[in-house]
Amino acid sequence: TSNAPVAAEQRETWTSSTGFILAAIGSAVGLGNIWRFPGVAYESGGGAFLIPYLVALLTAGIPILFLDYSIGHRYRAAAPLAYRRMAKPTETLGWFQIMLSFVIAVYYAAVIAWAASYFIFAFNLRWGQDTLGFFVGEYLKVGDPEISTTVVPAVAVPLVLVWVAVLVVIALGVTAGVQKVNVIFIPLLGVAFLGLVIRALTLPGAMDGLNAFFTPDWGALADLNVWIAAYSQIFFSLSIAFGIMVTYASYQRRKANMTSSGLVVAFANSSFEILAGIGVFATLGFMANQQSVQVSELEGLTGPILSFVTFPAVINEMPGGAIFGVVFFGSLILAGFTSIISILLGVAASVQEKFGLSRRGSAILVSGICAVLSVLLFSTTSGLLALDTVDQWANNVGIVLSAIVMTVLVVWVFRKSETLRRHLNAVSTFQVGRIWIALIGVVAPAFLVIMLGQKLVSLVN
Ligand code: PHE
């Protein structure tokens, strides 16, 4: 019956490598690239941050991306079941990763919902001159005693719509749902974002912004927190060690060039990320120019404030700002949506395989729970505060822990790395040497353990 767990042979697949690559890029390129990366890079040494960033990409990012792909593609299931097939006790790790993804989805949806609201506000610059007051006070209603514990309808409505859209795509499945959305959204996002960056670069002051962004603070390289920021950014941005790429790879056909696809995805993701940094800082350079201050004197350059307070303020000053605003928030929606559907597919497929539910049943169950949690946590006035804390723990601690446990279990405890390496090489044109095992078995976990220790000390203090 349709309720039986899907046998490996009948598993849905991406219809082409392009389908898989676009979906994987869709998962990778998200809010992390547009609003997380520029701020993190700026705070962590500017141009000098590119060094830890590249080191993290090469020593952990690409190697763990290959690891995710190899497990999903070989064991052909979402994370928990794929791990279980690899070595029974590792199923728990799969559930830990799925739980992290779940937590991220709950707040990620809130940011997409804010972007959806701002997409509409942008048409007539509804936010007015006091963009901070508008975002925090009027839109999120922070500090409003009347509704400090109830749901804010202006946030809850778009949030519910986001979850309904996610549900529909997941229920349609891998080919008709996820792949189709990505095949349309990702090229559209590429064009829209390129347009934004070109526009930003032609604004007066753009070059000052780029100077502020790229001027290296070499001293930052001595700070371990800068390194952990680079690794966390790479993990979050590539969607790795969350069980999500395991799931995506499990839907790839048996004969598929996995490692070459991985290189394309990693390259596209980092290019997009650096482009986003350029676009965002060119825009900030314009803002500094308008206010006759230095870029370094500007405030509100990170997190939600950057996109929802600082950007609206810049858009107010820009000739043709409304168009820029519509395209900017539209891009956030496209980027965010193609990422959140990857998370939900990972969670829903795991639940489906574990409990033998139908695809629709698990999609409804999981999206429903997420929707309720999102609305309760993030459309009430405490949402803004909760977001930062959740981001800290899930992304700087949770995901690093997940990567450490995953690499140690695969390489040392269950000794599967050689099997996985041969698996990758049997299907791919780009051959993975033994250095891969050294990276995932020694270099990455050693770095990560040191960084996690340091991070925990700094979080507890
Ligand atoms: N990679 C996405 C981004 O950069 C976020 C994400 C994390 C997606 C984990 C899937 C899994 O925004």
Image: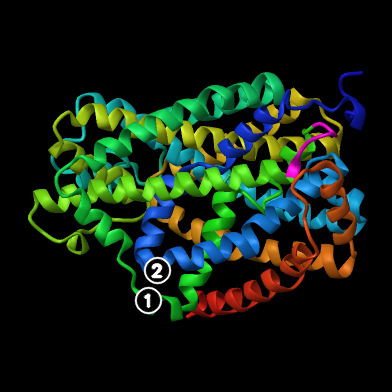
Q: Is mark 2 within 8 Å of ligand 1?
A: no
Name the one closer to the observer, 49 or 135. 49
**Residue 279 lies in what quarter of the image?**
top left
The circle drawn on residue 407 is: none
Q: Which of 322 and 23 is in front in this view?
A: 23
Quarter occupied by residue 319 = top left
Residue 163: image x %, image y %? 55, 29
Colour scheme of this structure image? rainbow
Task: Point out residue 379 in the picture as x, y percentages from the top left corner.
Answer: 42, 40
Q: Residue at 77% of width from left, 26% of height from top? A: 359
Q: Is residue 382 left or right of residue 365?
A: left
Task: Assess whether mark 1 and mark 2 are in contact (beta carbons under 8 angstroms).
Answer: yes
Residue type beneath disc 1: Trp
Q: Name the residue under label 1.
A: 218
Q: Report the side of 239 relative to 381 (left or right).
A: right
Q: Residue at x 67, y 66 (%)?
A: 401
Provide the residue designation for mark 2: 48
Residue at the location (24% across, 46% down)? Answer: 283
Q: Can residue 156 be seen in this view?
A: no
